[in-house]
Image (cartoon, grey):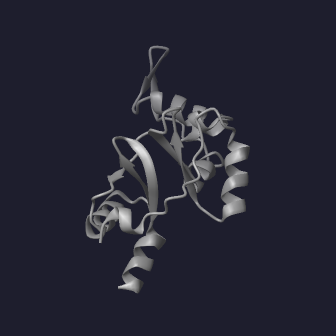
Amino acid sequence: MLAKDIMTKEVIAVKKDDTVERVIEILLEHNISGLPVVDEENRVIGIISEGDLIYRSKKLHIPAYFTLLDSYIFLENPKNLEMQIKKMAGYRVGEVMTDQVITVEEEETIEEIATIMSEKHVNRVPVVKNKKLMGIISRRDIIRAYANK
C-alpha cells in the first residue's frame, strides 16, 4: 500500500503569516493535532503542531555559564536561548512552526512511512509531489490502513 492510497487528500494548511490563534481554532474545530505550513505555490515550508503550541508555555532554559574576569563564558550556545524566546513569544505561524519538515512522496510504501514516523518521532507527514502538498498521513491513517487489510 502506498502513501497516495491512505493519505488524507483534503488537507487543511496554513500560511506562515497566519496567527497562532487561528491555528488553535482550526485544530480544535477539526479535532486534529497539526497542520502543514505552505507558501503561495502550495510548497510545504513547515509544520505547526500541538507540540509547537505547548512549547510556548514551557519553562525558559537559561544556558549554563560562568564568569571570568567580568566576562560571561557560556557553556552552551546562547543562540538556543534566542530561538526559545522567539518561539515562545511568537504571534505568527512562521515564528512558532517547525521548519525542518519530514515529508514523503506519493509512492512511499506504508512500511517506509511507519518507519520514518517511528524513527523521527513525528505524528504526521505531509505527502508531496514535486515539493507541492498533495495530502497528509497521520499515525491514525496508518493504523486504519492496517485494520482494513
Note whether residue 86 is visible: yes
Quarter of image, res 26: bottom right
Q: Please tell me which residue lies in front, 77 or 43.
A: 43
> Would residue 97 be found to the left or right of residue 54 on screen?
left
Q: How many numbered badges does the structure rendering display?
A: 0
Q: Is residue 131 above or below residue 86?
A: below
Residue drawn 55% across and 58% down? 10
Q: Please tell me which residue lies in front, 115 or 84.
A: 115
> Would residue 124 be found to the left or right of residue 13 on screen?
left
Q: Is residue 37 above or below residue 25?
A: above
Q: Please tell me which residue lies in front, 106 or 70.
A: 106
Q: Quadrant of the C terminus?
A: bottom left
Q: Position of residue 139 (x, y in %)?
A: 44, 69
Note whether residue 102 is visible: no
Q: Position of residue 12 (x, y in %)?
A: 59, 52
Residue drawn 58% across and 60% down? 33
Q: Please tell me which residue lies in front, 96 or 75.
A: 96
Residue drawn 58% across and 39% down? 96
Residue drawn 65% across and 65% down? 31
